[in-house]
Structures are given as C-alpha cells and as structure tokens.
Amino acid sequence: MESRKQNFTGALIALTTLFFMWGFITCMNDILIPFLKKMFELNRFESMMVQFSFFTAYFVGSLIYFIISARKGDPISKIGYKNGLLAGLLIAAFASLLFYPAAQLQIFALFLTALFILALGFTLLQIAANPYVALLGPPETASSRLNLSQAFNSLGTTLAPIFGGYFVFHFFTKWGKPLFSHSGKPVLTDAGEQLSILGIQIPYLLFAVLFILLAVLIKYTKLPRVVNPADVKKGAGALKHSHLVLGMVAIFLYVGAEVSIGSAFINYVGELLHYPEMEAKNFLAFYWGGAMIGRFLGAISLSSIKPAKKYVYMFFTSIVTFFVIYGIIFLESGGTFAFNRVAPFILFLILNYIGFLIGKSMPGRTLTVFALIVIGLLTTTLLTDGLLAMWTIVGIGLFNSIMWSNIFTLAIKDLKEDSAQGSSLLVMMILGGAILPLIQGAVADALHGYHYSFFVPIISYVYLAYYGWKGHIVKPRKVEG
C-alpha cells in the first residue's frame, strides 16, 4: 500500500507539471488577442476568433473521442493514460511550431489553425489527466487533489500575462524587424513601442521544445495503471447520469464566462482607464493569480486536514501567495509597480476566505456561495466605473478558482466505469470558451465598448449557483430487468 502511495505521488508531480504548462499556454491567448487585433486590424468580434478556434477544438476533439468510446470502447482505457498524455504533448509541440510560419507569412487563418491543433493536443491531455488525478487516491479527497493540480494550472495562467506579455510586447520585439499591418501601418503597442513578429515566434518555439521535454519526462515516469482494458465497455453509458449531464452545462458556462472575462480584460482596461498593455497585463495577472490562490485554498479546504489547522493554513497561504505574485510583478516592472496599486486585492482575499468558511468544505455548497459572490461583483461592475469597475472584475478570479475542480468531481462522482467517457463529455463542454467570448465580443461591438457586455457572464453564474445547490445531486439509476 505504501508503494502505491509513492507511485501516486510521482504521478501527481508529473501530471501537475502538465497542468502548469497548459494553463500557461491557454492564458497566452489573452496576450495574443491584443497582438493579433493590432497586427490584422480586427474588430472586437473578429479578435475573439482566437478563443473560438482554440476552444472549438476541445469540442471537436472530445466529440470524436466520445463517438469512438461509444462505438469501440474508451480509447484511454485501451492505450493507457501514459500514451494518451504522450500523444497530446506531441500534437501540442507540432502546433506550437506552426506559429513560426503563421507570423512569418502574416496569415490570420494559419494562426487560427495552429491554435485549433494546439487545443486538440490539450483535449487529450485534459481527458486523460483530470479523471486520473481524481482517481489517484480516496474518492473523498478527489476535489482536494484536483484543486491542487488546478492551482498549478493557475500558476501557469498567472505567470503567462506577466512573462508572456513582457516577451511579446517588449523583450523579443526589439530583436526582429518592425512589424507592419496589411494596410502598411506600423504595428505599435499602446505605449507606442514597435512590435516584431519575433515577439510571437520565439515564445512558441520555446513552448514546442518544452512540450517535447515534458513528453520525455512522462515517458520515463512510472504511472500506475488505474483502468483495466478488459473492463472497457461500449455505449454511451455516461449520459444516463443526470448529474453528469447538468455538469456538462455547468462546465460550458463556467469556462465560457472565465475565458470571456479574461479575454476582454486588457482591451476593457484600455477603454476604461486608458492603461497600455504592459500595465493592464499586471492586473490581468491578479485575475488569473486569484484563481491560483483560491485553488490552493480549495485544496486545503477540501482536504482531510483537521479544521483547527485547516483555516490557519488557508489564511497564511493566501497572504504568502498574494505577495509572491506582487513580488514577481514588482521585479518584472523594474520596481515601478507600487504596492498601493494592488492593495484593494486584499479585500477580495478576505471575502474569499469568508466564502470558504460559509462553504464548510463542501464542494457543492462552496460552488453556490462563490457563484453568488461573482454575480454580486459583476453587478457592481455594471453599476460603477473607473478603478472600482476594474477591481470587481479582477476579484472574480478568486471565486472562479474552485469551480472547475468542484464541478468536475461532482459531475463524475459515482460514474465508475463511465468515468473516462464522462470526462470526455465534460472536456467537450470547454466549447463554452469558444462561444461566450464571441457573444460578449459581439455585444461589446454593438454597445461600442466592453463595459455593459459584462452582463453576458452573469447568466453563467446564475446556473452555476443552481448546479452547486441542487443540480449536482446524484440520483439513483433504475436497475433494468
């Protein structure tokens, strides 16, 4: 039994590395959007095609996976989790290499194609990794393990705006020839700095190398086999679970809302406060950093740690992580990013902590509490202006934190042999990240600005509050015969 725990620890470390990488790359889309918007002179709706291409691939890839699993049995259970992870990493590496010719030839469609293939690779990673983390240990702590892995995913999404924005909009732009749009205009940052195609090419070449190195790491990491190929069943048994079907809708709306808010953020802050990209990205880092903090707290809250110690650990973790994020931004800015500019975030940390206390370490209850808080924050955004409107958007990240993990584990609870197929259906619903940003972008174009378009994600959080309250409850299946 002890050896199995050691195996699980090694597997969790390897999987957590994957969570970090796909979090970083996914959040790089928030940097790509303003870059490509300038490069190809796109409107708000057109710029959201970045997210549409990326997240549509999750739907297409998961749909193909589901059809195969329904007709011939679950592929991951047949080939093994390790081979599924390796295939996903190699596809992602190939897609990252496509960014070089896309930038060189300045073909928007090729960028979208590269993003689509990249997300196909991530689809395989998601289908294999999420249920695998949930299954590597006792069912009662599955949400805690998934929150911990998702916390490192959020570490990637936190660092992406800081370092990705720095490399794309500042560092690598100095290396190459000045970039001009198709109409012949120089492509500049909001601060007036000339952009270069190397700002996109070099980061994605580095990503390709990292994916290959990760594939080598996974190849030589001992991963315990959880599912026996002999037990693989055909059919669409997962769809017979009502809490999974409702969870699919929840994933669609959650991912759609989170991605839509993050995608609009840099352009919204530019409209609202006239912040250039290099400044706006620092606050975007706190939006995604909030998700990281909340997921670390979620991992502690839903763990088996005694309550007396649990909330002390949560308090110190939130404070330490906050200062780590600020310290990284402070150093990256050359010491010019003053602390008083991020001090309001502490108020949201306190509110987040209170939310966890009310949630009482119950995944469904915590999901409902956090969704209701986000509805309040978005309503405040719509009714206010200036810094308050920006900070209520930034604060949402803290409360988005546990949503993926809690929805996922609630949705696959008691699925047993249908777990991998159920996972593919949930990953399919990442399609929300393609649809909702497009809707919000279209609404923003119609309203001549992003501000009032934030009513769109409110609809998502109303449903998420319901799913955490009632929708996740497992209903007993009727025994046939």
Image (cartoon, helix red, strand yellow):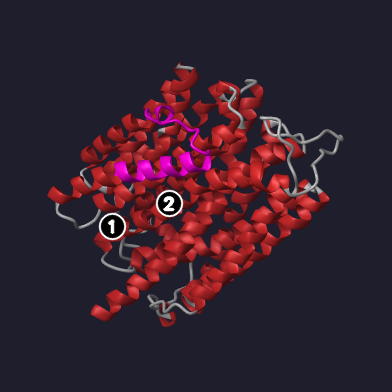
Q: Position of residue 23 (x, y in %)?
A: 50, 53
Q: Position of residue 262 (x, y in %)?
A: 53, 38
Instruction: Give the magenta part as a residue range.
Output: 318-344
Alpha-carbon distance for marks 1 and 2? 14 Å
Q: Quadrant of the C terminus?
A: bottom left
Q: Check whether the beta carbons of the residues at disc 1 and disc 2 lie within 8 A of each other.
A: no
Query: Left of 212 or right of it: where is 388?
Result: left
Nearest the viewer among 39 and 304 is: 39
Q: Nearer the viewer, mark 1 or mark 2?
A: 2
Res 93 → quadrant? bottom right
Q: Is residue 29 positioned above or below 220 on the image?
A: above
Identify the residue position indicated by label 2 in the image. 245
Q: Residues within 10 Å of mark 2 (few under 14, many from 20)?
A: some
Q: Residue furthest front?
A: 335
User: Number of marks in the image?
Assistant: 2
Please report the residue visible at 74 percent of the width from the left and 57 percent of the height from the top.
Answer: 100
Nearest the viewer among 4 and 24 is: 24
Query: Left of 329 or right of it: where is 182?
Result: right
